[in-house]
Amino acid sequence: MLLGIIAAVSGCGKDDVAAPNANEKFWLKTNGPTGGSVSSLAINSSGHIFAGTVGGVFRSVNNGNTWRQANSGLTTSNVRTLAINSSGHIFAGTPGGVFRSMNNGDAWTPVNTGLTTPSVNTLAINSSGHIFVGTVGGVFRSVNNGDSWTQVNTGLISTIVLTLAINSSGHIFAGTWSGVGVFRSENNGDSWTPVNNELANTDVLALAINSSGHVFAGTWGGVFRSENSGDSWVQANTGLTAPSVNALAISSGGHIFAGTYGGAFRSDNNGDSWAQVNTGLINTIVLALAINSNGYIFAGTWGGVFRSVKSTN
């Protein structure tokens, strides 16, 4: 419950967010990486952290205390997105396509057969191991671990896909550019339906889904929440003083974190209200968030990776 990180507030109701303790840091800067701004983070089952930067991939096997570049075979250094499957295979999305590592990042191989639009913005993997990539030319799917790709754009009005998320039922959500919001596929990407309603004229930069199936969309105008699989949305911005939301992450305890150009925010009440959690965050341009199995949250910024001082569970 973030004990020791959040100070108890007298009279704090169930719908209020507790204020951070000003005398205690929430964040600790890790010792890297050195590859410039960190636009993506992923953590494998062993707790190894992978950071995608404009200088390639960096790996930490000790909770961020040290980092080493892991770029062998990676011919495009700008890594925008990372995803890891249940076998521990790592996929990196770049402006030059997808790369795969089957040895913990020691070596990378391009896997782009059929990927006719190689500029990749986002990656997501479902429970069957099917991989989906969002590109400037729509969504592509691989059912063979990236060996080949098929375009799956039917019904997708905007083909500039910035973010993807998959719920426990296998429904895929695609956040798009060009002000047309979110699309949902209930058939493994074969077709898409706009689920925008209140998200009209909004670019969706980040998506996350909690254990109750509630979908959260990060936009230039803050966070929107859907409790019915995208059929309708409500704005959930109270206390979110920096509304440009680049990243979202949800802890196993249900705490929601938003990374913005004004730092990090946390909601403990399903997005109804937010509190800024920036103490110790030297660089407040947060581009990526990831939470490990012990509940520690990592933030990728323009100035390296930061780690929470304590667990967020």
Image (cartoon, rainbow, N blue to C red):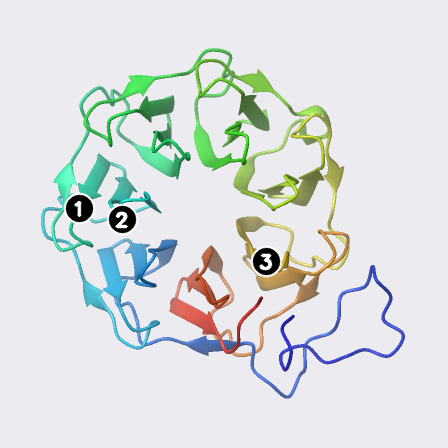
Gap between marks 3 and 2, in whole Å?
25 Å
Which residue is found at the position 41% from the left and 76% from the top?
Answer: 29
Q: Is residue 180 above or below residue 280?
A: above
The three-letter code of the residue at mark 3 reads Phe
Q: How many marks?
A: 3
Q: Position of residue 76 (x, y in %)?
A: 18, 44
The three-letter code of the residue at mark 1 reads Met
According to the picture, the residue beneath numbered tag 1 turns out to be: 102
Whether label 1 touches label 2, CB < 8 Å: yes
- Dot 2 falls on a residue whose secondary structure is loop
According to the picture, the residue beneath numbered tag 3 turns out to be: 257
Viewer-side residue, 219 vs 150: 150
Name the residue at the top extreme.
154
Gap between marks 1 and 2, in whole Å?
7 Å
Q: Quadrant of residue 38?
A: bottom left
Name the residue at the right extreme.
11
According to the picture, the residue beneath numbered tag 2 turns out to be: 88
Question: Does residue 246 appear left or right of residue 17 in this picture?
Answer: left
- Dot 3 falls on a residue whose secondary structure is strand
